[in-house]
Amino acid sequence: MALLFEPITINENIILKNRIIMSPMCQYSSVDGYPNSWHTVHYTTRAVGGAGAIILEATAVSPEGRISYGDLGIWKDDHIDSYNELTEEIKKYNCVPGIQLAHAGRKASCGKPWINHHQIKPNEVNGWRTISSSDLPFLEEDHPPHPLTVDEIKNVVLQFKVAAQRAIKAGFEILEIHGAHGYLVHQFLSPLINRRTDEYGGSFENRIRFTLEVVEAIKSVITTQSLWIRISATDWAEGGWSLEDSIKLSKILQEKGVDLIDVSTGGGVSYQNIPVEKGYQLPFAEGIKKESECLVGAVGLIETPLEAEEILENEQADLIFLGRELLRNPYFPMLASEVLHAEVKWPNQYERSKPRN
């Protein structure tokens, strides 16, 4: 059996049928945070296609935590029922439903990318005042974010906790914290963004405090679910968050009960310098995997079954997160099983299209 199609036990309650994970990818297609028919078709199709787990796109824990006014949300109890149908459909195909709990911080209040992805000012339609660890805007032309007070930080931690409770009621079995790409959690971690002088800024121990409080809050309400976190393992900028920082944090997160580190990079500052090429993020996933006891997910420009299999064979990661490739091809897992000569059951309705050797 190809490694890509070997089942893996995440915790004593969750077993994935394979190592293929649908990476969170914003659809910008929600109204007031609710999923709709687009989301149902979009995600269920990937479950039919054979993914081992699906992590829903960044889902805001508060209205001002949305990247755009079209983002999904889970900031009110009324959202719960709207996700139940979706998680039930995903589970029908032996696929584990997950959700990425997110707060965009200073990168919030943006337009939809196919309309205008720039920040919308607080006094404009569909805009609001953003928040962050400090008052530094992402772009010079952006409206400066409001730097959170300690009491306001505690409130955001509570928002993550209550959102996790709602997600569990909605049937999600994996909860992933979005701690990457320059969003709020990352805005506390990075010394390029976090200029605080209180207990949430300055030293490494202070800058990770908010992240750990969010983790502990969510862990306090989890029963059988698995907690994951996506991080940017480097800022790709001098003086920023680094792989060494990520390894130190990952060891602490493992002790706190996080099951998997989803390893991405960048997004924190506009002047980052990312050498985008095949495998450019793999050294970070591999570095964290070798130094911590957490499971590790690799993501970024993984496009073929052979590439995914090689990553697993080289022990650079435990799971393969696919983003754009699953947008292009929802049935990647089914077709990958043929390329890797793995015996995988296709949906009965599609069996007649299975290649015959």
Image: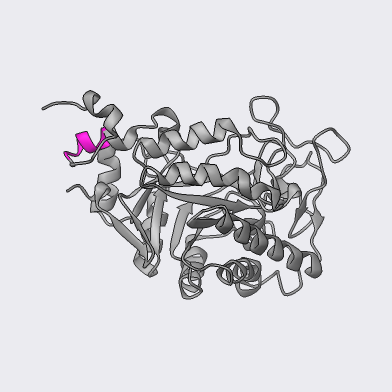
Q: Residue furthest right?
A: 123
Q: Is residue 337 magenta?
A: yes
Residue 15 found in image quarter: bottom left
**In this view of the protein, which residue sits in the foreground, 69 or 192?**
69
Q: Is residue 224 at least partly visible in the picture?
A: yes
Residue at 57%, 60% in the rendered image: 241
Residue at 81%, 66% in the rendered image: 149
Position in image of residue 164 (x %, y %)? 60, 60
Q: Is residue 254 above or below residue 9?
A: below
Q: Is residue 44 above or below residue 195?
A: above
Position in image of residue 301 (x %, y %)? 41, 38
Q: Is residue 295 above or below residue 101?
A: below
Position in image of residue 250 (x %, y %)? 47, 67
The magenta segment is 335-341
On the rendered structure, is 102 left or right of 319?
Answer: right
Q: Main secondary structure of the magenta part?
A: helix
Q: Is residue 281 above or below residue 290?
A: above
Q: Residue furthest left?
A: 357
Q: Is residue 268 magenta?
A: no
**In this view of the protein, which residue sits in the foreground, 170 or 68?**
170
Q: Is residue 24 at least partly visible in the picture?
A: no
Label tally: 0
> Quadrant location of the C terminus?
top left
Residue at 47%, 56% in the rendered image: 173
Residue 211 found in image quarter: bottom right
